[in-house]
Every structure is written in structure tokens, then in C-alpha cells.
């Protein structure tokens, strides 16, 4: 996107990379004040090639990149492989993927195999970069390994059951997806803090802090607590939308004791995310000093 106009102006969509055949994009993204967050969202479900991008991106010079998921990753891989082979002199190839079980997979010829990173690595990367599509895939995986079909519904049911087994009140949560984009997602900060405390009793707390970015250093929270004595002692996941800012994770207080915490700011009257962050930093610093 080009975003060098005035606040409130429409952006201009410059390019889409990589090239995706048949992709159509409707751009409704406008320019917000410089220094604000990326609040552009891409709408359109799996296997859908008509996408709508809405929201805002910060004012500035040069191009601004917004990332989204592929409509059909296996089909895109087939397309890219076919193009590479054609470049190397192969005849033009047909490529197709099936969105259902392949009963003839025994007839396939193995070309190359690829081993996935560990689940822990995927979780840490998703938390560092706030990658929504990874969170959605993890939710489906939770549903699958707990006896379901690998759907959102199965994953949400498994999470609610786990919350109940921890002795927590599952009435304090309502989930519609795995990444938190739905406005119908609901959770109390009390439940989140209690959940983090309870899971930390099942393993050493270092197992769980290793899955979260460190405030002041990593990922989406590298700007948090930059000039604070709490820097380097807080492992936290952030969440933000317009007028919303949340933090949840663990803090190692001055005493050396670890505490879980959750802060959720909704319907903020703050000027921008930076102003909201400064106020929430004060709360985290109090947790650090008195824990």
C-alpha cells in the first residue's frame, strides 16, 4: 500500500506478492496518524479468491506491507512448482488439489519430504508475530488430537473442557475463533490470569515463558517497557484492535517470585496505541515492584 496522503484518505494498493492466480482484492484501507498500529484486516474465507481489506495503516512515506493467508496453500504450491518446472524446460503442467480425502494416495511418488518445526516453535513464532492463521491452525489441531475432526468447534470444545479440568469457571469465556478477531470473543482478565497460573503448576514456569515474547526485546512487545526496570522480567502476549489493548503473561517480580497477570483495556479514550501502552506499562511496573 501507498500511504503518503492525509489522514482519512484512501490508500492505494501497489502490488500483491507472490502472484496468486484469480485473486481479486477490494481495497477499503484508509490512512491513520503516523505511529499508529497496523489495523488492516483481510476478509474472505478459505478457498475464496475474492478478498476485502478494511481498516487503517499508519501515515508515512514509502510502501506499507500487510500480510494475509493464501486462499488455498496446496493449490498455490502446485502452481508455483508447475511454473518452476516450465522455466526449466518442462511441458506446461496441469495442477489441481482436492479439498477432501484422497483415496488413491498410495499411487503417489515421493519427491521430497519436509519435517515441520515442533509445536512449541510454531506457538512461539505465532506469539512473537501475532500470526492469526497459525493460531487458527493450532485451534483445529487441538480439536483433532482430542478426538474431533479438526474443526474450530472441536478445538473450542476441547479448550473449554481443559479449563473445567483445571477447576476454573468456563462460563467466563466465549470463543468464536482461534485468533481473537471476532467481536463475539469474550473472556474475563480474571479467568486468563487464573488459567496462566494453573497451567504453570503443571510444568516448570520456564516452559511457559519460553512460549512468550519478552517485553522490551521480542516480537510485537519489543517496544513495551523499554525504559522500565521491569524490562527483561516480563513475558507477555499482546492483543490490540481499535480502542482495545490487552496484555497477558508472566512477571518475575523484584522478589524473584513469578506471577501471572492479565490486563484488558476496552473502549479506550486514549489518542492512540502508544498512549494506551504507556498507561498499561504503569500497571505492569506495579506488578513487578510488589510481587
Image (spheres, grey):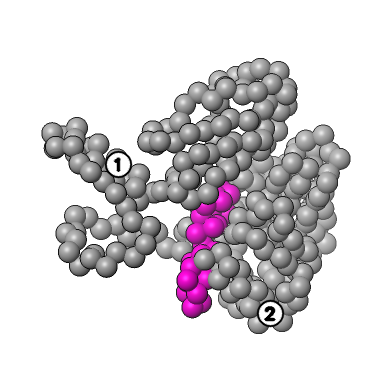
Q: Position of residue 237 (x, y in %)?
A: 65, 54
The picture places residue 275, in percent across and down from the top left corner, at 80, 38
Reply yes or no: does residue 211 show up in magenta: no
Residue 218 drawn at (x, y percent): 58, 47
Residue lying at the far top of the rendered structure: 5
Q: Which residue is mark 1?
A: 79
1 or 2: mark nearer the eye: 1
Mark 1 burial class by Cα count in 10 Å: few <14, some 14-19, many 20+: some
Q: Can you give x and y, in whole percent of width and height, for residue 247 in the image?
A: 72, 54
Look at the numbered disc 2 and give the secondary structure of its residue.
helix
Where is 209 relative to 73, above or below? below
- Quadrant position of residue 80: top left
Question: Residue at position x 52%, y 52% from top?
Answer: 133
Residue 59 occupies which quadrant of the picture? top right
What residue is pinned by disc 2? 164
Quarter of the picture containing the C terminus is: bottom right
Whichever of labels 1 and 2 marks the residue nearer the N terminus, that label is: 1
Q: Residue at x 27, y 68 (%)?
A: 103
Residue at image coords 19%, 32% = 87
Farthest residue in the right direction?
A: 269
Q: Is residue 148 magenta?
A: yes
Q: Which residues are magenta?
A: 126-150
Q: Secondary structure at mark 1?
A: helix
Q: Main secondary structure of the magenta part?
A: helix
Crowding around mark 2 (Cα neighbors within 10 Å: few <14, some 14 to 19, many 20+) is: few
Q: Quadrant of the N terminus?
A: top right
Relative vertical location of residue 269 with respect to residue 29 in this rendering, above or below: below
Q: Residue at x 73, y 67 (%)?
A: 173
Q: Is residue 195 visible?
A: yes
Amino acid at each position: 500500500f501507498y500511504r503518503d496522503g492525509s489522514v482519512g484518505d484512501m490508500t492505494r494498493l501497489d502490488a500483491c506478492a507472490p502472484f496468486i492466480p484469480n485473486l481479486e482484492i477490494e481495497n477499503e484501507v484508509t490512512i491513520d496518524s503516523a505511529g499508529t498500529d497496523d489495523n488492516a484486516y483481510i476478509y474472505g474465507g478459505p478457498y475464496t479468491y475474492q478478498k476485502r481489506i478494511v481498516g487503517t495503516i499508519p501515515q508515512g512515506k514509502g510502501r506499507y506491507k500487510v500480510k494475509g493467508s493464501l486462499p488455498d496453500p496446496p493449490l498455490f504450491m502446485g502452481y508455483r512448482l508447475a511454473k518452476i518446472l516450465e522455466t526449466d524446460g518442462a511441458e506446461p503442467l496441469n495442477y489441481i488439489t482436492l479439498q477432501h480425502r484422497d483415496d488413491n494416495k498410495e499411487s503417489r511418488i515421493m519427491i521430497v519430504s519436509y519435517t515441520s518445526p515442533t509445536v512449541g516453535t510454531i506457538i512461539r513464532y505465532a506469539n512473537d508475530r501475532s500470526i492469526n492463521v497459525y493460531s487458527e491452525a493450532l485451534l483445529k489441531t487441538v480439536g483433532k488430537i482430542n478426538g474431533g475432526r479438526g474443526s474450530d468447534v472441536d478445538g473450542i470444545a476441547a479448550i473449554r473442557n481443559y479449563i473445567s479440568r483445571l477447576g476454573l469457571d468456563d462460563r467466563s469465556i466465549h470463543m468464536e475463533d482461534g485468533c481473537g478477531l471476532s467481536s463475539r470473543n469474550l473472556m474475563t482478565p480474571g479467568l486468563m490470569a487464573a488459567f496462566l497460573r494453573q497451567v504453570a503448576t503443571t510444568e516448570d514456569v520456564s516452559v511457559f515463558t519460553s512460549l512468550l515474547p519478552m517485553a522490551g526485546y521480542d516480537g510485537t512487545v519489543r517496544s513495551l517497557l523499554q525504559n522500565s526496570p521491569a524490562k527483561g522480567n516480563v513475558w507477555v502476549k499482546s492483543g490490540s484492535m481499535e480502542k482495545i489493548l490487552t496484555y497477558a503473561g508472566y512477571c518475575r517480580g523484584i522478589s524473584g517470585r513469578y506471577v501471572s497477570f492479565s490486563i484488558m483495556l476496552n473502549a479506550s479514550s486514549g489518542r492512540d496505541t502508544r498512549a494506551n501502552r504507556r498507561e498499561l506499562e504503569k500497571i505492569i511496573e506495579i506488578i513487578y515492584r510488589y510481587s
